[in-house]
Amino acid sequence: MTIQTTKKVALINGPNLHLLGIREPEIYGSVTLTDITNRLTSQAISHGIELIAYQSNHEGAIVDFIGECGLLSSDPVDGVIINPGAYTHTSVAIRDALSAMDKPFIEVHLSNIHSREPFRSHSYLSDKAVGVICGLGDMGYTMAMDWFIKHLN
């Protein structure tokens, strides 16, 4: 049985997230980005949602991707799950790209950014996000997809 997809969600991961599972597992856990992407893809497909996954260590590439699956697309995504990594605390450009897209997005962080170094507690994206999930490890991604499953169908 084939499930027809009618909605699309972009999963965007920022710098160093390709190192999940081997980078500081005491902070970020042992689950890899591939594990997370595969799990979310299955979760999305079972609810008729297509997941478009993207990871980059480069701010401009992330901005370009947001534009390409948003305003510049003839078939734009319906929402975004984003873990901007370190760009959370520095990128007005990613904030502006997401704002221009005018689609709901959820900001996800594996660690609790508010219990870490003081500079990590400020996010340039949070006030524009429909929700922020932090500190719950890779489960935060699943929770974000649950929100889209409920609100897009």
Image (spheres, helix red, strand yellow):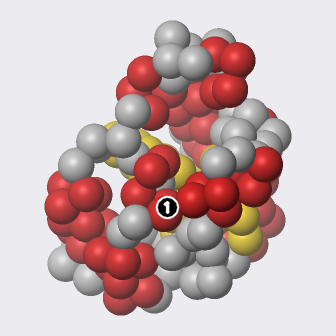
Q: Residue at x 65, y 57 (%)?
A: 118
Residue that protrudes farthest toward the front in the picture? 118
- In the rendered view of the protein, which quadrant contains the C terminus? bottom right
Q: Residue at x 63, y 83 (%)?
A: 127
> Who is closer to the viewer here, 70 or 130?
130
Give the vertical position of 63 relative to 124 (above or below). Answer: above
Q: Which quadrant of the figure has residue 36?
A: top right
- In the rendered view of the protein, which quadrant contains the N terminus? top right
Q: Residue at x 36, y 41 (%)?
A: 15
Question: Badge 1: how crowded within 10 Å, few (<14), some, or many (20+)?
Answer: many
Give the vertical position of 2 relative to 50 (above or below). Answer: above
> Who is closer to the viewer here, 61 or 4?
61
Give the vertical position of 100 relative to 83 (above or below). Answer: below
Q: Is residue 44 left or right of residue 73?
A: right
State the image coordinates of residue 135 (x, y, percent, origin top left). Answer: 78, 44
Q: Secondary structure at mark 1?
A: helix
State the image coordinates of residue 39 (x, y, percent, origin top left). Answer: 63, 29
Instruction: Tell me, yes or no, if residue 63 can be seen here.
Output: yes
State the image coordinates of residue 74 (x, y, percent, origin top left). Answer: 23, 77
Q: Residue at x 36, y 69 (%)?
A: 91
State the image coordinates of residue 32 (x, y, percent, origin top left). Answer: 54, 19
Instruction: Tell me, yes or no, if residue 1 can be seen here.
Output: no
Q: Is residue 46 left or right of residue 33?
A: right
> Who is closer to the viewer here, 107 or 121?
121
Mark 1 = which residue?
88
**Amino acid type, residue under disc 1 in the picture:** Thr
